[in-house]
Structure formats: C-alpha cells, structure tokens
Amino acid sequence: MTSLYIGLKGTRTLKKPKAWWDNPNAFEEKQLYINLRYQPQEENPDDNYEFEFHKKKSIPKNDERNYWFKVGKILDLESIFEYATDNSLSKNEAQILEKLKNAFCTNSLISYFEETEKNLDKVLKIFIRVNSGGTQLSYSDLLMSILTANFSSDIRDLMNKFVDSVRDQGFGVMGRDQVLKTCLLLTESNHIFQLKNFSKSNINKIEDNWEKITEAVFKAIKLLQEFGYTNRLSSAYILSILAYYIFINENYTQDNKEQMLNFVRNTQITSYFTTSLDGKLEVAAKTLRDSDNFKDFNEKLSNSKVQPLKISGDDIERMLDFQYGNPAVLPILQILYPNLDFKNSTFHIDHIYPKSKFNAINLSLPIEYHGKANFLYNLQLLEGDENLAKKAKDPEIWLDEHYQEDTDKIKAYKERNYIETNFELNWKEIDEFERLRSEKLKLQLETIFGLKKQNTST
C-alpha cells in the first residue's frame, strides 16, 4: 500500500551520484511516470510496460519512442478520450491509459476485509500476517516501535545492546521477546504479550526501572554461570524467574542460592517451561511473590494444585533413558556429583566407555550396544583437562594411566562414579555395567528426591 501511494501521490528522493551528504542540493525528488510509447520485447512475456521515476524538470521529450505520463495524474483524468484527442495519442496509447485508469479507479484488484472490532492486537497480528512476503516483522518489532515512541531515551538501541550482551554471556536463549516479557514481569505488569500491557504507565515503569532490571538479569546470569549453565540453559523463563527474585530481594543469602540451583535443575530435568509458558510463568511469579524465601517458593511450587514443579518416580525412570545432548542431562549429573566445584572449575559431560567405539568395528562390543553410547549409564562429569587427556581411551587403560596403577585411587574413582569397585570395565561386560550402574544411579536419585521406597516388615 505504501508503494502504491508513493507511485500515485508521493515522491522518491535519492542522492545524486558523487554528491556530498551534507549538500542540501544533493537530493532529487522524483515522481513515477509510465512511457505510453514503449515497445515491449516480444521474446520476453514479462516485458509489458516501462515505468521510471523522473524529475519534473528533466522528463525526456516526447518523440517516436517516448511519451512519459505521470502515473498519479490518472486519478484526476475525467475523460481518457478527450486527453488522447488533445494530445494526439494513438489507439494503443489510449488503451494503456484506459488500463491504468481501470486498475486504479474501477477494478477491485485489492482484496481487503473490514475489521470492525477495535482491538489493536488483532490489527498487529493481521499486519504481521499480510506482511509476511515483505520485510519480516515480529510482534515484538511492533511493540518495540510503541516503546520507542514512549521512551525518553533510545530504547531500541538500549535493548539491542542488552540482548547482544546477554547472548555474549552465553545466554542467547533470551532474545528480545523474552527481555520485553521479563521487563513486564519485573515491574509487576501483566507479562502476556498483548498491546494493552504496553500501556504508557507500564512503559514508564520499565523506563524508570531499566537499570535495576538489567542489573537483576545480569546477576541472574552470573548465578547461572556459577551453576554451570553457560550455553546450556533450556529456557529463558528460568532466567526470568531468577531475575524477578533478585529484583524484589536484592540481599539474597547462600541458602537462597542453593535453592535457586535446585529450581534451575528441576525445571531443566522436567522441561517445565516447554508447554503452557505464560500460565506457568504466572503461577511461578505469583508463588514467588507470596513466598518468604526461595526454599519456601520451591516448596509451594512443588505442592501447587496448578502447574506444580515436582520430580516423580516416573521422572526418575525417564532420566535413565535421557541421552547426551538432552538439556536435562547436566542437572542430573550435577545432582549425582554434588561435591564438584562448578564455580571455579569447568566440567565436561564425559563418556565412560568412549563414544567412538560403539560400532561394528569394535568386535568386543555386543551387537545390541552398537550406537548406545549416549545413555545416562555411560555418562559422568569429568574436569575439562582430564577429559581432554582421556580422549578415546578404554576406561581401564585410562584409569591405570591416570592413577598410575594405584589400586586404592582407582577404587575410589569407581565408588564416587557409581561403579562397583571390583568391576572391570571391559567391553564384553558392558551389559552388566549398564545394569549395575543404572541401579545405583536410580537409587541415588530416589534418595535425593525423597522417593526411596521404605522397607516394611510384615
């Protein structure tokens, strides 16, 4: 519609070649013209008409091949016949003008429907849908335009820099949409992505609290980095909840940090923020507002009748089937290895039996284990340097080299990694290794989550 309007009523302004930008005479206003005497190329079926933008004072003179007619003039032309007669136009030239007149003044070539409901959200969504063939605009692009119009500072620039900085910290999962939603959440406005929630009063709250909002988000990022979740966070909603708690409780304690870690782990393991996102965010936010501390929040959210966050026995059964690459694997291993210093050391998710040897080339590997390297039974957390040195060595060979054949140290390694201390880690017995280690992992997880079945006497 904008392009049509420019062609009919507007002008196109371009800078002259080699002219300086600060020269007021460097820019030329041009209007759209059609050449009524253009001869199309017969071999090109798409070559029908010649349109060009021209300055009013530099229109090519009329001759055998040129008769430039200003397109917008068609709106004021009452009679094609009279104009053609007065200007000695041929029958073909008059027919082109007739087609132009019909296209803009007679034929219903533009499809439209009238939206009777005064709902700007509908208007924005319609705009996004019909604009899908042009420059792609998201809902947040349009909301950003509203923020830009109401912010006293350049919010678009601030937002872009903020999103880039969050991404550079290893949390690209939080894009601009989530930043906008987090701004609403932290200022206790309705976080649902609707135009009405970006009212002038809500925008003013965002602007007044911008520094505090960004500070809370970066503090939440720092915590997540300490927890080991750089480039490993499954949902930006997790970051939003942590930032919200920090925003309303600046002086959080170490106990709260530990409870925050529990929250992060549980949400990752259960994929809590993958469905009913806005509903779960609302439940979590309301629960947080009604809690004295993060431990209280975790307990209340676990027992919530609506969207509870709780680890069940079925969840633990499923954990054993999780594979390398699943966002839940890291928190599960962190829970299984509680004494590792994630803040000051980097730990890799390592395959106990090397992944590269789970194939037919390894004749010692039972055929049913081909391609079965990535399950939880074969994963451990290993310090980065140790993992790089380990490479693809068989486990018993690596243990002998790493611990210099010290039997006690090898047994201690196996014990803390949920492996029978006297079990020899060879390929032929990998099925027994899977069975024994899976039992130990399951028992430990049941104990940690308070789901261990109690023995009863009869």
Image: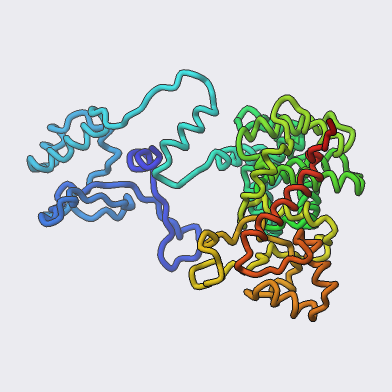
Q: Relative to 204, does residue 213 appear above or below in the rendering?
A: below
Observer-nearest of 12 and 122: 122
Quadrant where the C terminus is found in the figure: top right
* Most distant residue in the top direction: 116
The quarter holding residue 355 reads: bottom right
Q: Is residue 122 visible?
A: yes
The quarter holding residue 307 reads: top right
Observer-nearest of 36 and 408: 408
Quadrant where the N terminus is found in the figure: top left
Q: Which residue corresponds to the image point at 44% horizontal and 56% vertical from the top-left?
A: 27
- Place of residue 239 in the rendered image (x, y in percent of width and height, measured from the top left): 73, 46
Q: Which residue corresponds to the image point at 59% horizontal and 61% vertical from the top-left?
A: 373
- Place of residue 415 in the rendered image (x, y in percent of width and height, measured from the top left): 81, 62
Q: Relative to 16, does residue 242 appear above or below in the rendering?
A: above
Observer-nearest of 59 and 161: 161
Q: Is residue 164 visible?
A: no
Q: Which residue corresponds to the image point at 86% horizontal and 38% vertical from the top-left?
A: 295
- Place of residue 37 in the rendered image (x, y in percent of width and height, measured from the top left): 14, 50
Side (left or right) of 116 relative to 199? left
Count of numbered circles on the image: 0
Q: How is the image coloured?
A: rainbow
Observer-nearest of 328 and 216: 328
Q: Which residue corresponds to the image point at 73% horizontal and 39% vertical from the top-left?
A: 311
Side (left or right) of 258 relative to 142? right
